[in-house]
Image: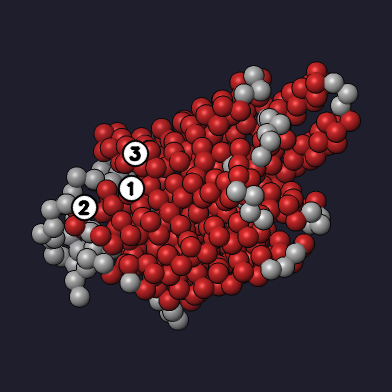
Amino acid sequence: MNSTPNQNKTAFGPMVICCALFFILGFVTWANGSLIPFAKKAFDLETDLQAYLVTFASYIAYFFLAIPSSWILKKIGFHNGLVTSLVILGLGSLLFIPAAEKSSYILFLTAIFVQGSGMALLQTAVNPYLSIIGPIDSAAQRISIAGFCNKTAGIVAPIILSTLLLKGANAAEARLAQAGSETEKQNILNELLQQLHAPYIALAAVLGLFAIVLKFVKLPEVNMEKEESVDGVTHSKKSIFDYPHLFLGALAIFFCVAVEVMAGDIIGTYARELGTVPAVFRDNATAFTLGFMLVGYLIGIITIPKFISQQAALRICTSVGILFTILSVFTTGVISFWFVALLGLANSLMWPAIFPLGIKGLGRFTKTGSAIMIMGIAGGAIWPLVYGFMKDKLHIDFQHAFLYAMVPGYLYIIYFASKGHKAGTAK
């Protein structure tokens, strides 16, 4: 496939496909985050640190699969890459069934890792489409629309999972407290795990059907072998390592996703630690964070670059993030919960600002550079474990552990926004 869309207008069909794919990415990503409290109860885990392996399994796949995904796409093309990613996502969803049948947390985590592998390939494949399905000067608008679909899915997923799984988990918790024997307790846990069947079979079926439809949809292909230049000038730099701002940007993405996952996925267990937060907030905690992210996203669409630059937006967001984190630590109950949820507003514009700054000026290395940036998503795997280790192993108060986990990430992003993105570039 070598067809290209009319560059004077956005190709409507491919744009719809991109939005649907970003919705899928958002749904699966945040659905996995909602599984943390469910997994702790259903597998009778002793600590939050063990439960945070759910996010580790999902996000660490990006670290291992980002670069291989770029190689796979060179071999099979972007269109086939999109189809393949959906098939992998579907297979990962089906793995939840034997994980539930065998009550195996290892197999449960394997299913999430397989899903993460599919998302790494999908993320690497779908992003270039947003720059080729219409004129370049409206690319930001397309990214905003696709991002809105992504975050909307992130709100929908926790609500659906809460309805299907967490209510049953809360009921099971009460029954477990009254269980008279180990056999009775195990039977209750097995019943709870059976609730995974319906949602993940349905998800696998939807992904499979969409993969079949997508296979027969004509989409513009990306020529990855074409030498790229910036402003019509071909770079003389010979290696990706000649661009230090790229690697500083990948580290900024690491911390960006780290604080985003802390605010979006950890908020549920954080709310339970607070103790006085109503159940409706606890069970739908991620949806509140993502709701504030949508608000921030809309603010960014209106203000950037008309009123403020990307770098300025990044500095503002990180400063607000530090403020809300401090306020969350030194308040209690519902007030503390809302400050954590408000971190969604602070985190909303970080990825859109960091990513283009990290790959700016890479020329023919842009594809590889983008894959390196995507590897930074592993921050979502590592940072919850750091938080859990401080809380469960070092016995640091959960609110102070939250402070120690969040503030260093925000401080580094401020550095990248101010100086890091200029490293190694011409003065």
* Residue 69: assigned label: 3
- Amino acid on which disc 2 is placed: Ile
Q: Which of 188 and 310 is in front in this view?
A: 188
With respect to residue 308, does 334 lie above or below? above
Quadrant of residue 97 within the rendered picture: top right
Q: Nearer the viewer, residue 330 or 166?
A: 330
Given the current orientation, which residue lies at the most extreme bottom position?
A: 307
Q: Would residue 246 be found to the left or right of residue 185 on screen?
A: left
Q: What element carries label 2?
A: helix
Q: Which residue is drawn at 72% across and 68% down?
A: 331
Question: Gap between marks 2 and 1, in whole Å?
Answer: 12 Å
Q: Specify few, some or many for label 1: CA neighbours under 10 Å numbering under 14, 14-19, or 20 or more.
A: many
Mark count: 3
With respect to residue 192, does 253 lie above or below? below
Q: Would you say the residues marked 1 and 3 are in contact, meaning their CB atoms lie under 8 Å apart?
A: yes
Q: Would you say the residues marked 3 and 2 are in contact, meaning their CB atoms lie under 8 Å apart?
A: no
- Amino acid on which disc 1 is placed: Ala
Quadrant of residue 260 within the rendered picture: bottom right
Q: In which quarter of the image is the C terminus?
A: bottom left
Residue 6 can be seen in this image: no
Mark 2 lies on residue: 240
